[in-house]
Amino acid sequence: MLALNKEHAIPYGFPIDSTYSDFVWAIKCIRAIRGCLKECKVIALEYIRTLFVHVPRAIMLYCCTRMPWLYQFLPDNIELRIDHFLGNVTMSINTLYPIEREILSGMYEKHTVNVINIFVSKGDFCLDIGANIGAISFALAQRVGMHGTVMCFEPGPTPYYRFIDNLSLNPRLRRIIVPQKIGFSDSPGTMFWNEFEHNPGDANLTQTPLWNSVPVSVTTVDDYFEKHPIKRLNFVKIDVGNMASDVFKGGMNTWKKFTPIFYYETPQADTEPVCAAHAREIQCMLSSLGYSFYTLREDNTLLPARYPHYAVNTLALTDRQLYL
């Protein structure tokens, strides 16, 4: 806090021969300059956005490849195709969807891909729960190779069918990736997929319908794999928002049987009480199976994590997995 000289009402450290009005005037000038710079930036960015409307798509792709930050300024609802996602994956991109815009940079969730490269091995059997359009599914498929399997679960019709379209562009990965249009919860039934108006292609699942709801089928992990038995399970990625605790709850028998490595989007305990309850519930469930929790640092070292101090994404490992 700025201390004031009670006699002259001048901040300590301000030149004594200056008047307080000069000080106020200087602050107003600085704020005005900052405001002008922000306005200039907005104008420049709008100019870039307008310019892109008239640019051939090949040049759009070239610019976004060279300067990935430009993807955010592309016009909405433009269809593009790239062949350099994750190095050699072909993707059809619609700029209406923020996730797909980010893919134009050639990478999506770099930190998650780094986790996959460290903790997933050739030939592994993986689950991608909350696969969306398959950006992380493709990273898993590249890592496990032709002798591995990636089962991908996405209940939302919009992302699921875009995922299928992109998979068709990569026939070499179709033997590895097994997409399923179904969601997971703590009990089988029907829920409602509600696309976010401000973030097309992303959504949440609710028990009751909203104005834009689409009914989707859900089941539990245990029920699904009782009907479709598997012999091994090595790695599970879960990105389902506040549904994570329900997904974990519905798969406890499967987790106990296979003890896979988990990498999951963590409900943030400091945002809402319901998130705190979900985060604590997940910790209790996995701790009972012998898991400990970690954040992967930038230098690839593991930082232990405990409720309520979790990063956005958390690794859950058993002691055996930790020391492999």
Image (tube, rainbow, N blue to C red):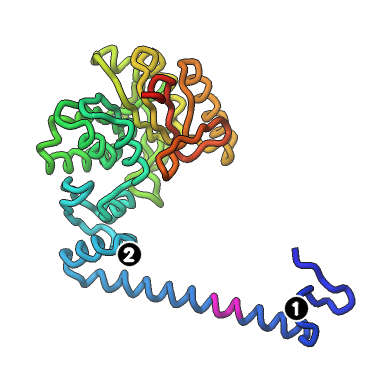
Q: Which residues are magenta?
A: 30-34
Residue 104, position in %: x, y? 25, 55
Q: Is residue 215 visible?
A: no
Q: Is 91 situated above or below 261?
A: below
Residue that numbered label 1 is attached to? 14
Q: Outermost residue, bottom direction?
A: 17
Q: Is 151 situated above or below 57?
A: above
Which quadrant of the view contains residue 204?
top left
Q: Which one is closest to the eye, mark 1 or mark 2?
A: 1
Q: Outermost residue, front direction?
A: 323
Residue 43, position in %: x, y? 40, 76
Name the residue rendered at 48%, 28% in the picture. 293
Q: Nearer the viewer, residue 44 or 212?
A: 44
Which quadrant of the view contains residue 75?
bottom left
Q: Nearer the viewer, residue 191 or 220?
A: 220
Left or right side of 213 for 271: right
Cα distance, mark 1 to mark 2? 43 Å
Query: Are dots 1 and 2 in contact, CB under 8 Å?
Result: no
Q: In the rendered structure, which amino acid carries the disc numbered 1? A: Phe
**In the structure shown, which secondary structural element does the residue marked by tag 2 occupy?**
helix
Q: Is residue 147 visible?
A: yes
Q: Is residue 33 magenta?
A: yes
Q: Outermost residue, left direction?
A: 171
Residue 139, position in %: x, y? 25, 39
Left or right side of 147 for 27: right
Instruction: For the C terminus, give its image quadrant.
Output: top left
Q: Which mark is residue 73?
A: 2
Instruction: For the N terminus, give its image quadrant.
Output: bottom right
Q: Is residue 272 magenta?
A: no
Q: Earlier in the sequence, mark 1 or mark 2?
A: 1
Name the residue rendered at 16%, 47% in the picture. 88
Q: In the rendered structure, which amino acid carries the disc numbered 2? A: Phe
